[in-house]
Amino acid sequence: MSQPLEAIMRDRVFRPLGMTRSSFVWTPSVQEALIPGAKVNGAPREAWPLKQGVAAFSLYTTAEDYAHFVLAVLTDRELLQTIELAPIDVEADLNLAWGLGWGIERTSSGRYLWQWGNNPGYRAFVMLRPASGDAVILLSSGEGGLSIAKPVVQDALPDEHRVFQWSMLQPDGLDLMCRYVRLCW
């Protein structure tokens, strides 16, 4: 019998990990706690309430709750092996691959797992280093939030992080139009 994503995640991930402020669907508690998002130019972005969970982009969470999740990933050797079981090259020149749900960056000093979020009004980036157990979580209530990801990650996890050269993490045409021409959608 199939269950909605929200029910599966609540029972198998959120509750066991103590993620009390996370949901894949819009709820009254999400609405109450949500910090309003902003366009690249800082103008408010209208909330986008999702009534049905979508694994790829509808997670509402807090930095504390997401830290519980990242810690669980970092401490589960079997899960880490599964994530990296059959990576697919994404950008060979940048030493980037895609594992099970996570990007994999290989550097001369080791490997990192990373993931990013790009929703209207919000940006997110997380990177972890399984070898050391270190991680960085960046949750931004602004569409320009990824602009600070590189210096924050570089400070916390010093290395040559070529992931920030990947085209998917670059500002797109709409961001540039909003930032420089002041035409924002």
Image: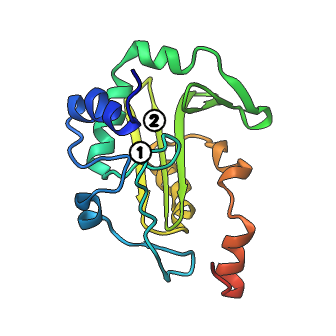
Tell me if 128 is positioned left or right of 26 in this view. Answer: right
Q: Position of residue 116 (x, y in %)?
A: 54, 47
- Label 1: few (<14), some (14–19) or many (≥20) C-alpha neighbours in 10 Å: some
Nearest to the observer: residue 93 or residue 46: 46
Give the residue at mark 2.
128
* 6 relative to 111, above or below: below
- Which residue is found at the position 55% from the left and 68% from the top? 144
Count of numbered circles in the view: 2
At a point 31% along the width and 41% down the height, the residue shown is: 67
Label 1: state its secondary structure: strand
**Which quadrant does the N terminus fall into?**
top left
Q: Which mark is residue 3?
A: none
> Is residue 88 positioned above or below 147 on the image?
above
Residue position marked by numbered label 1 in the rendering = 136
> Horizontal and vertical percent for residue 103?
59, 34
Local crowd size for mark 2, using a 10 Å CA cut-off: few (<14), some (14–19), many (≥20): many
Outermost residue on the right side: it is 93
Query: Picture quarter containing residue 160?
Result: top right
> Tag 2: residue type?
Leu
| Quarter of the image that includes the C terminus | bottom right
